[in-house]
Each structure stands twice: as structure tokens, then as C-alpha cells.
Image: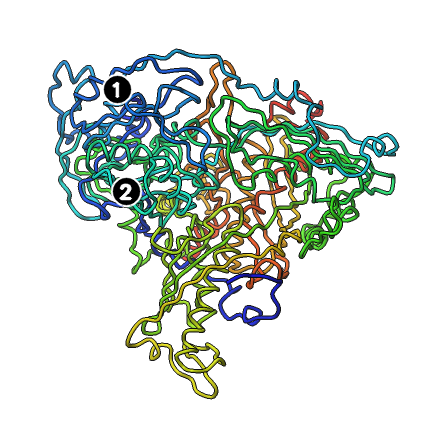
């Protein structure tokens, strides 16, 4: 099997963290034929139900389909982006059951009944979320390709800080975590922006954090 | 229209829209994920299949056999096209490495097959089933060896005065060698295309390209078909930095797959494929010699460099080009060796030549200032020139480098800098300050546009691209300014070969050229409106055309039928008699960890001289983007060459380390209030490449200032300093 189709252990663990019952509800992929076990055949299909941006979708897909490709190809959402397909760039960041993940590192069949929020569920061009508006106001992007992932991460970062989830730069693990520039930079570092809009992204997130404080 | 002489006072000097901080007009589409990039265009053509590439796993040799039977029989597979199935495709005039066809392998991950299937999973799986037999050949992948052999050979590319005599008699001299590694553009959107060549006749390619007209011409040459039968669209480009200047294998494989499967095919290059299949910035090795009197005036400059290129050329990374122009000095010799290696094709990446050249040259200037006991800012001011030093009859059109240095030094607090290397501590961090100068040319290219006025709404159409640079917005601003319309009354349509050919995006020529093209089209539209009003005295203000004492709403003028005009701006030869450039000064503070030698950039300041700034919002973004890319170049970016096998080893975004959010500190950009009447009617030059120039050297100089350790081999990783750190921390 090509390595990219192998489920990533980290994202599996992340999934299990917050939706341990979801894995129990996951539909069995069924018995594999010897040929399929050898990875010769195309891989079988599974029907999965996902709630994406508040709407139920039932899709039948190749078991090897990542959540990212399910969103991009099956549901034809253009928001989640494929920058590397290896969990190295963050362009595919979406929220699953309230937590951000790299959707390229997760197979769609692992998400039975999960609630997925993509940038399309955060706000539309005509009805922007405050974080989207802040990205425009501070020019937090250039080419725009990493932007949906940045915004999905940015919203999650503020939630993670509020929930008291520490990061590498959190100095006091017992105190309330403040929204500092260092915290935002650290937590946003899984989302690469090659155009280099980081300083503007920081300004956008800081503004939203201050408005909510 | 032809721009034949420097412009005088014009409406842009009283601008209402141009030059004003303007949020991107394409912003709402981008932040909501609705801007359509190449691979996502589900709506443009039905029945799309998915293609997946296979790359060669040798650096040089021949393919003796390919067994595709299993792949062809795999579920969902509609077509398999291998490089043995077709004659070698033509190498277009914009390419050097052949993109497909034939049994010869000339570089690692050269595309050797495309599998087309109903789904990505099926195509990818089937591609893995293809069994390839190679006959491997020895290749030459070693720039260092070529440098050692070539140093001092060949004639100079340019020489003035008596360099050898000047060095022999100089009071202070410097002779050092610097190295910059191979680098990758690493734009976020991989090369991607949807191609419809189902009938084998007419081809439409929805792609991600900086240069629509070049892409079309390349496709025509590659497939030996008429350009008129090809349409190319690329309205949104997820970053390019030079990677998407030229046709790449994504479009070629998608087209071949489409012809074979007789259906549209979409294909994106997998990220690990891009680094060796596509292009990169060549590594360089540079020997720089400087000579000066005790007064600090440079008397001689010698710069000899080598970079590698693919057989046939294509490498633009000539680090010595800027050395001809940047500083004064009567005696000068520059020489560049383009060494042919069998590595993947090196090509243009953001500020080709200047980026690597300044990484080295601006360290040399820092070293020389220290030898002279001078402030490096003062040293540069002293050696400024207002003319081409090798052709003193050729003046710079508008050069304010000294102002950049002075304003920057003042703003940064340069007088309070750490003066003696290793002298300032902040806890475990050694703190250093460094600066560097920057120079990048400001070329222009012919650029056309069409404008349509309908019910008072202006639509601008040009094949110009927006690669994140802000083209949509500055072209809307230009149209609004010319017609006296609010920005909301202007729509900009880009990146379509059905529109007039533009400069495209690259070489920092896009903003200056494409706005001039829209200007030309708008002039034609204004003339057409004046003609209809039977007057030649018209003004355009507040949505009205004002003829004599009458104000007529543009909505009324164009109520019954749209008024269209089209024109192309050509740039006259007078520009050849001038040096038109952009300049900057960069100031940086770093901390270097006293125990680990980890370098952290603490603050960055850029002062830029680039003529009128069309949109301070997007211009600043381009500059901080360049500073960020340069930060990566200074501290982490390096494609590692496997010299026996001949490929870049770290070919993904985990191994090739670009700057991430945690690496980037506070960044400040100041634009000098300058105008360059020689560049275009808008008096505006590009900034996209200026932003990367000189920054890495400023970081290197600050690192030296912090530690007293001079690293001349980028990137400045901790292993290069660890054994030279101060004994105590």
C-alpha cells in the first residue's frame, strides 16, 4: 500500500481522545479477500454518515479515502485544502467534534457520525465570521491557499487557550493561560503560510481575542 | 500605447484610490474558501477523471522496460500512459528538462507515467503497481567539485579598471567564500491542472500558472499543436515564487491522460514529488574580494560565483549580476560559472540572482566594515552611487538607498546597538544587531488589458495573474482612479487566455507592468467616451464624466450598450538608458542561545524605496512575506543533495524547513515616499522580490554580532556554531 493511505497514529489517538464512543459505532469495513489484503485490489467501499457543517451526509467511499478527500471530492467542498497530504502544512485543518485535526491524516471511515466543521461552516463570503473579517482587515493572507486552514486553526487556538490546554510555551501549568503572542505563534505553527503573512495573522487573531475578552 | 519618456505630473499624483490602503477585493472569497484553485474546479467540465504521476527513481539513465499490465487491469483505471508509449515531447522554449516521453531519464522524479482512474485512491494504487527497470548511468551532482575545478578559469563577464593593481595597492582587503544551498519555492498549492483534451483536438487547461501566455505557448510547442486550439485559465494561484512561471508536468500529464482516456483529467503533483520533479533555486558558491582605502571608499570589487543548471540552461541564479551595480568603486570584475549538473532543473525563484548574491555580498560588506573599523551603515552610505559604476553615463532613474539606510538606522535605534560581538546578554541569550542593504531591478514587460463600461460599472479583463500579490486589488484601484469610480464599481477578471496578454506575475515586473496596461486600456476608453461626447476636454470624477460644465453620469453614458476599449502598454527603449531599480535597508535583532547556539530573530525592520506604493496593505504583505522567506533561507532552508544518487533527499515539508509562525517576530516595514517617473505612468515599482533581498545577510550579520562567530555557509544552523560558543554561559 502507498504510505499515504495508512492511517496516522497521532490523528487516530487524537480522535479517540474526544470521541471514544465514535470508534465503537464505526461500521466494520467487512471481510477482506486475500487479494485485497495484499493490497492488489482497489479496496472496498464503506458507507459513512458524517455531519458536515450541520448537514447530514451519507457517502459511500473507498476505504482508503482520507477525510480531506471525502470533503474535497465527495462533498466537493473547496474550503479544506490539500497542501502536502502528509500532515506537514496544516492547509487541510478542519474541526472534528470540536477539535482541530489535519484532515489529510485521517481516514473518512473513522468518522462515522462525527461532526465536521470546515471553513464553509464558519462563515460565508456574504456573512463572515469575525475571525474571517479580521483576516481581511489585517491582510492575514496573500495567495489564500492556506487561509481556510489558518482560520480553522485560529478559532480552535482561542478555544484551546480558553479551555486551559497548555502548549510548549505555557510557563505556568496551574495558572489561567493568557492569550499572548507567544501562545498564538506556538499554537499556529502547524499551519504553514509560505507567503509569510504570519505577522498579520497574529494581528488578526489578537484582535478577535481582545474583542471576546 | 507606448511609454516613451519619463512621465510628468498626472492624475495619479492627485490620486483618490491609488496609493490608499485598500483591503483585498478578493478577500471575502479567500477567507471563506470559495476562491477556486485549479484542482477544485468541479464546475468547469463534467466527468473528470483523476490522474496520478509516477516518477523515476534514478538520477540519470535509461528505462529498459515498464510492466504496466497490473496497473492497466487495476480497478477503476481508465488509461495508463508511460514515457515509453510516446515519442519524446518537444522541450518548449520556456523549459530545459523534457517534461515527458522517451526512455531517457535526466533527473530524479522525472515523470515517467501517468495513471488515470475514477478516483485518486485507484489511480495512486495502480501507479504503485507499475514495474520499472532502469539502466542507471553515472551523473554529475557535485557543485563543490565543479567550483574547485572552475575557480579562476574563464573570462570575466564584466570588468572595468585594473582590479589586480587596485588589490595590490589597497590598504584594506577582504577575500572570503560564501555558500548558499539549493532552495525550494515550497508554495502552498502544489502544481495542479485539469486538462480537457478529450477529442485530441482542442485543449483547455485549468491550471495554476503565473504566466498565462507562456503556459499556452509552451503547451503548443510541447504538443506541437496550434496555440489557437488551446485555452488556459488560472484565476487563483496558491503561491508561485517562480515555481509556476513555466509549464510543468502536472498540465502535461493531465493533457496526455485526457487524450488517452477521452475524458477530462485532473492531476496534482504529490508534495514529495515536487522538489525533484519541478524546479528549485540553485545552490551557489561565491568568492568575494573587496579592496578599500582607510577612508572606507571601495577601490575594487571582485565577485566570482558558480551555480548549477540543467543542460540547455534555465538557471537565472547569477549572484554576480547585482555586483555590477550596487556600490561605487572604480575597479571591478565579475564572473559567473553556470555549471551543468544532472540534478533537477534549477530555475527562477523569488529574486533570482539578487537573493543569493546579497546573502553573500552583504556579509562581505559587514566584514569589510569591521576591518575598516566603520559603522556598516556609514560604510554603505559612503559607497553609494547614483550611476552605474561600470557605465557612468547610465544614471539610476531614482535611487534613494541612502535614505533607506538613514531612516532605518534612526527607526531601529541603530546607535544603541550592540557594538562589540558577544558583548550583550539577555539571560541565556546573546543579543546581536545586524543590517544589510538590498537592491533588486525593476523590469517592465509589455502588458495589455480590455475594459468594459456597462451601466456605470467597469470590468477589467486581462490575463494577468494574482499569485497572492494583490493584482486583483491594484488593477481595480487603477480602473477606479482612471474612470473616477468607487472601487465597488469595478470588477477585475484575471488569468484567462481569452483576455489580452499581460506581463504576468514574476521578476517583480507584474505590478508596474499590469497597472500600466490597465491604464492604457482606460485611456482608450476615456478617449472613446470623449469622442462620443464630441469633445476632447473631459474629466472623470465621482462616477461622472465632466465635459465643459456638464457632468454626465457614467451610468447614463453606458446605459444602452457597453462601451469597450482595449490597449497594450509597451515600454520604450529609453528605459534601457537608465538603471531602474528598487532599494532597501534591513535591520535585525537576534538572540543566540549561549548553550545551544539556536538563533531566534527578535525583531525585523525593512525600509523600502520602490516608487509609488499602489496599495500599502498588499505591498507591506509582500515585503513581510519576503522577510519571512529570507528568515527561512538564513536559518533553516536547504535542499540536501544525495551526491551519489543525485536527488534532493528532504523532499517534503517536514524535511525542507520553511519558517513557521513561531519563528517570525515583530516585523516593521517603512516605504519611503518616492516616485519614479521612468518606470510607468503610475511611477510605481514592484516590491515582491525586494522584500527577500538582503534580509538573510542582515540575520547573518546580527548572528555574528551576537556571538563573534562568522558563518559563511547558509543556512546558519546551530551545528556550525556549537563548537565555537563562548566557554561559559
Q: Secondary structure at mark 2?
A: strand
Q: Nearer the viewer, residue B472 or B395?
A: B395
Quadrant the C terminus of chain B occupies:
top right
SS state under label 1: loop
In this orientation, does residue B294 appear?
Answer: yes
Tell me which residue sits at (50%, 71%) in the image: B16
Residue at the image position 13 percent from the left and 30 percent from the top:
A46
Q: Chain of mark 2?
A: B
**Which numbered disc covers residue A1?**
1
Circle 2 sits on which residue? B203
Q: Nearer the viewer, mark 2 or mark 1?
A: 2
- Residue B320 position within the rendered picture, expressed as x and y whole percent measured from the top left: 66, 36
A134 vs B461, nearest the viewer? B461
Give the residue at x 32% y 57%.
A128
Question: Could you say where residue B689 lies in the image, as x and y percent from the top left?
Answer: 55, 46
- When the figure is inspected, residue A94 is found, relative to residue B485, above or below; the finding is above
When asked about the image quadrant of residue A82, the answer is: top left
Q: Please name whichever residue, B161 or B39, is drawn nearer the observer in this view of the structure.
A: B161
Amino acid at each position: 500500500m502507498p504510505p499515504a493511505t495508512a492511517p496516522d497514529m497521532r490523528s487516530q489517538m487524537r480522535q479517540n481522545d474526544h470521541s471514544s464512543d465514535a470508534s465503537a459505532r464505526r461500521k466494520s469495513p467487512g471481510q477482506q479477500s486475500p487479494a485485497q489484503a495484499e493490497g492488489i485490489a482497489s479496496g472496498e467501499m464503506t458507507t459513512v454518515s458524517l455531519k458536515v457543517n450541520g448537514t447530514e451526509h451519507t457517502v459511500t467511499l473507498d476505504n482508503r479515502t482520507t477525510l480531506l478527500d471525502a470533503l474535497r471530492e465527495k462533498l466537493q467542498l473547496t474550503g479544506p485544502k490539500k497542501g502536502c497530504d502528509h500532515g506537514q502544512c496544516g492547509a487541510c485543518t478542519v474541526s472534528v467534534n470540536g477539535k482541530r485535526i489535519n484532515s489529510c491524516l485521517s481516514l473518512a471511515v473513522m468518522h462515522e457520525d462525527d461532526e465536521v466543521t470546515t471553513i464553509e461552516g464558519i462563515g460565508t463570503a456574504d456573512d463572515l465570521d469575525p475571525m474571517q473579517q479580521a483576516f481581511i482587515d489585517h491582510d492575514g493572507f496573500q495567495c489564500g491557499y492556506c487561509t481556510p486552514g489558518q482560520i480553522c486553526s485560529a478559532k480552535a487556538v482561542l478555544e484551546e487557550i480558553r479551555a486551559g490546554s497548555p502548549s510548549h510555551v505555557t510557563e505556568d501549568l496551574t495558572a489561567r493561560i493568557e492569550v499572548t503572542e507567544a501562545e498564538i505563534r506556538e499554537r499556529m505553527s502547524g499551519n504553514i503560510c509560505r507567503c509569510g503573512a504570519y505577522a498579520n495573522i497574529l494581528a488578526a487573531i489578537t484582535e478577535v481575542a481582545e474583542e471576546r475578552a | 500605447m507606448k511609454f516613451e519618456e519619463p512621465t510628468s505630473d498626472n492624475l495619479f499624483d492627485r490620486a483618490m484610490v491609488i496609493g490608499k490602503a485598500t483591503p483585498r477585493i478578493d478577500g471575502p472569497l479567500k477567507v471563506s474558501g470559495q476562491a477556486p484553485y485549479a484542482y477544485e474546479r468541479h464546475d468547469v467540465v463534467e466527468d473528470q477523471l483523476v490522474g496520478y504521476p509516477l516518477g523515476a527513481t534514478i538520477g540519470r539513465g535509461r528505462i529498459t522496460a515498464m510492466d504496466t499490465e497490473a496497473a492497466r487491469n487495476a480497478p477503476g483505471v481508465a488509461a495508463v500512459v508511460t514515457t515509453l508509449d510516446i515519442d519524446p515531447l518537444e522541450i518548449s522554449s520556456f523549459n530545459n528538462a523534457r517534461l515527458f516521453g522517451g526512455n531517457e531519464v535526466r533527473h530524479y522524479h522525472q515523470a515517467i507515467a501517468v495513471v488515470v482512474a475514477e478516483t485518486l485512491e485507484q489511480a495512486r494504487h495502480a501507479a504503485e503497481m507499475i514495474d520499472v527497470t532502469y539502466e542507471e548511468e553515472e551523473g554529475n551532482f557535485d557543485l563543490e567539485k565543479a567550483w574547485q575545478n572552475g575557480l579562476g578559469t574563464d573570462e570575466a563577464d564584466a570588468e572595468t579598471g585594473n582590479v589586480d593593481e587596485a588589490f595590490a595597492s589597497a590598504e584594506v582587503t577582504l577575500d572570503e567564500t560564501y555558500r548558499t544551498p539549493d532552495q525550494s519555492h515550497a508554495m502552498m498549492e502544489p502544481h495542479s491542472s485539469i486538462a480537457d483534451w478529450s477529442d485530441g483536438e482542442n485543449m483547455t487547461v485549468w491550471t495554476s500558472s503565473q504566466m498565462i501566455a507562456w503556459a499556452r505557448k509552451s503547451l503548443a510547442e510541447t504538443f506541437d499543436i496550434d496555440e489557437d486550439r488551446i485555452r488556459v485559465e488560472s484565476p487563483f494561484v496558491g503561491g508561485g515564487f517562480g515555481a509556476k512561471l513555466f509549464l510543468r508536468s502536472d498540465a502535461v500529464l493531465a493533457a496526455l491522460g485526457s487524450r488517452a482516456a477521452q475524458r477530462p483529467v485532473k492531476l496534482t503533483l504529490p508534495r514529495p514529488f515536487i522538489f525533484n520533479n519541478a524546479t528549485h533555486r540553485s545552490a551557489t558558491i561565491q568568492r568575494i574580494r573587496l579592496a578599500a582605502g582607510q577612508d572606507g571608499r571601495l577601490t575594487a570589487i571582485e565577485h566570482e560565483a558558480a551555480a548549477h543548471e540543467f543542460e540547455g540552461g534555465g538557471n537565472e541564479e547569477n549572484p554576480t549580476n547585482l555586483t555590477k551595480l550596487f556600490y561605487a568603486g572604480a575597479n571591478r570584475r565579475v564572473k559567473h560559472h553556470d555549471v551543468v549538473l544532472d540534478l533537477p532543473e534549477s530555475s527562477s525563484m523569488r529574486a533570482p540572482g539578487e537573493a543569493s548574491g546579497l546573502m553573500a555580498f552583504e556579509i562581505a560588506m559587514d566584514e569589510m566594515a569591521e576591518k575598516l573599523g566603520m559603522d556598516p551603515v556609514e560604510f554603505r552610505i559612503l559607497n553609494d552611487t547614483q550611476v552605474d559604476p561600470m557605465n557612468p553615463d547610465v544614471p539610476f532613474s531614482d535611487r534613494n538607498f541612502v535614505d533607506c539606510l538613514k531612516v532605518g538606522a534612526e527607526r531601529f535605534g541603530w546607535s544603541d546597538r550592540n557594538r562589540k560581538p558577544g558583548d550583550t546578554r539577555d539571560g541565556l541569550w546573546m543579543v546581536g544587531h545586524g543590517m544589510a542593504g538590498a537592491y533588486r531591478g525593476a523590469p517592465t514587460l509589455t502588458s495589455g488589458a480590455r475594459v468594459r463600461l456597462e451601466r456605470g460599472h467597469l470590468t477589467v479583463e486581462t490575463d494577468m495573474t494574482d499569485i497572492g500579490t494583490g493584482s486583483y486589488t491594484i488593477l481595480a484601484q487603477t480602473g477606479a482612479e482612471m474612470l473616477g469610480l468607487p472601487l465597488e464599481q469595478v470588477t477585475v477578471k484575471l488569468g484567462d487566455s481569452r483576455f489580452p496578454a499581460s506581463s504576468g506575475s514574476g521578476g517583480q515586473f507584474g505590478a508596474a507592468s499590469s497597472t500600466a496596461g490597465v491604464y492604457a486600456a482606460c485611456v482608450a476608453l476615456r478617449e472613446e467616451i470623449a469622442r462620443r461626447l464630441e469633445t476632447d476636454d473631459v474629466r472623470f470624477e465621482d462616477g461622472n464624466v465632466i465635459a465643459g460644465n456638464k457632468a454626465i453620469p457614467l451610468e447614463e453614458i453606458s446605459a444602452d450598450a457597453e462601451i469597450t476599449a482595449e490597449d497594450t502598454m509597451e515600454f520604450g527603449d529609453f528605459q534601457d538608458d537608465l538603471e531602474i531599480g528598487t532599494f532597501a535597508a534591513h535591520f535585525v535583532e537576534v538572540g543566540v542561545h549561549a548553550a545551544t547556539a539556536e538563533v531566534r530573530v527578535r525583531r525585523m525592520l525593512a525600509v523600502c524605496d520602490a516608487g509609488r506604493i499602489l496599495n500599502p496593505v498588499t505591498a507591506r504583505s509582500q515585503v513581510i512575506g519576503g522577510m519571512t522567506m529570507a528568515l527561512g533561507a538564513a536559518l533553516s532552508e536547504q535542499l540536501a543533495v544525495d551526491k551519489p544518487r543525485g536527488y534532493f533527499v528532504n523532499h517534503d515539508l517536514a524535511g525542507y524547513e520553511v519558517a513557521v509562525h513561531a519563528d517570525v517576530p515583530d516585523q516593521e516595514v517603512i516605504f519611503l515616499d518616492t516616485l519614479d517617473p521612468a518606470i510607468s505612468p503610475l511611477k510605481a515599482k514592484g516590491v515582491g522580490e525586494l522584500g527577500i533581498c538582503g534580509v538573510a545577510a542582515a540575520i547573518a550579520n546580527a548572528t555574528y554580532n551576537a556571538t563573534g562567530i562568522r558563518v559563511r555557509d547558509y543556512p546558519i544552523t546551530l551545528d556550525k556554531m556549537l563548537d565555537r560558543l563562548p566557554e561559559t554561559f
